[in-house]
Amino acid sequence: MCISLHEQVEETFGYYHPATFTLKWLMISIFTSLKKYDEAETLCSRILGGFNDDSDVNEAEGRAKRSFTLLLARICMLRGQTEKGEKLLLGPSASSHATGISGSLLEKHLTSRLWTQYLSQDMSRDMQAWIESHLVKEETGKAGSCQQPFNILCNRIYMSLSQNEIEKAKDLLVEAREMFDRANSEDYAKASMFSDLAALYIKLDEYGDLKVLCDDATTGDWESLWQSDVRFSCIVVLIRCYVHWNRGELDETVDLCQRALEMPHNSRELGSAPKRYLLIVLASVYMQQGKLLEAEKQLVAAIQETRELKKKRCMSANYEPVLTSMSVLAECYNRKGEQDGVQRCLKLVERCQRELLNARQGGLNI
């Protein structure tokens, strides 16, 4: 449908019209969200090939070229092609005509993606300079006034981690926690701040502080906030499970997962995605306890939740976490010599893989 509409729009308005570029952007975004990176990259490269190579281009064309260059860089990052994405970010087509809302928003998302690529390795000086420049623009309001100081501080922490400045990162994390504590408990933004702060505690192995953060999230004056938001309450539960699990408190992890799954509002509103993760966590703990049949029951339920999610969103990649866990369970059965359990797991994995193949080929979406 998008392809047909795209042809009509381009014929009506012309190649360089904003409506044409918007629809092209939408098509690439759809391909990317479906993890069809080959199609997304091909279309993005074809669009970039239609721009003039010389630097003497008008401002509108320059912004469009910059935006699609950043979009291509993002696709490369998602594919794990860090070096290729780096070259695109540092190239002249990404740095010229540095104004424009689209480019600025993409820079914001790209910097978030960059941390996962560089935290385990050294970041090149050129990339450090690029990110420093981006952070300066954020702090001066040039990259979007909606960027909160808390988010900028989190970016600074990740930057320090990528440069192996651990003590500096820890000092900044203390500052971030103080900023979080000062935030109005009635402000819904505090929920997203919680997730960012928890991720940083995990990255820095500060599990004591993370436990305190989780305890505070379920008590005090903002308890009603997270309890009223099902998705956020699930995030709190998952992080609390992670804390217990990391401390070897397996019974506490099981109890927390079971209580979350049994809560009345969860059965009505939780939805497939958060519930699926709770089931996978519960299955993983059961495997660690040697309760393989219980683990299998949880993973079968997680697969059913995944099917429900696919019906709504058509995202075949949602199968990957639960299939990985099912493969691990098959190995556990094999080590105990329980071949019936191995066969049950492998048959279920094979069935799900067929469903994945059908989905990717445009078949039944079940």
Image: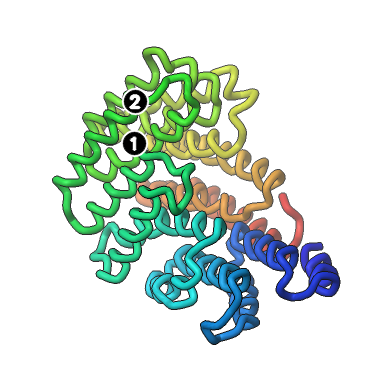
Looking at the rendered image, the quarter that the N terminus falls into is: bottom right
Rendered residue at 31%/30% (across/down): 179
Identify the residue position indicated by label 1 in the image.
198
Instruction: Determine whether 305 is above or below 361 in the image.
Output: above
Q: Is residue 64 left or right of residue 342?
A: right
Q: Give, as a three-letter code, the residue at label 2.
A: Cys
What is the three-letter code of the residue carrying label 1?
Ala
Q: Would you identify the image quadrant in which residue 193 lies?
A: top left
Q: Secondary structure at mark 2?
A: helix
Disc tally is 2
How would you rate the neighbour count of disc 2 (Cα within 10 Å): few for under 14, some for 14-19, many for 20 or more? some
Determine which residue is flagged by label 2.
Answer: 214
Q: Residue at x 42, y 50 (%)?
A: 328
Q: Is residue 342 visible?
A: no
N-terminal of the pair, mark 1 or mark 2, is 1
Q: Position of residue 289 (x, y in %)?
A: 33, 34
> Can you tell which quarter of the image residue 49 is in?
bottom right
In x, y percent, where is residue 109? 47, 54
Callout 1–callout 2 Cβ contact below 8 Å: yes
User: From this viewpoint, which residue is outermost toward the bottom?
Assistant: 54
Q: Residue at x 54, y 86 (%)?
A: 54
Quick check: 25 left or right of 320? Answer: right
Q: Please give the label number shown on residue 92.
A: none
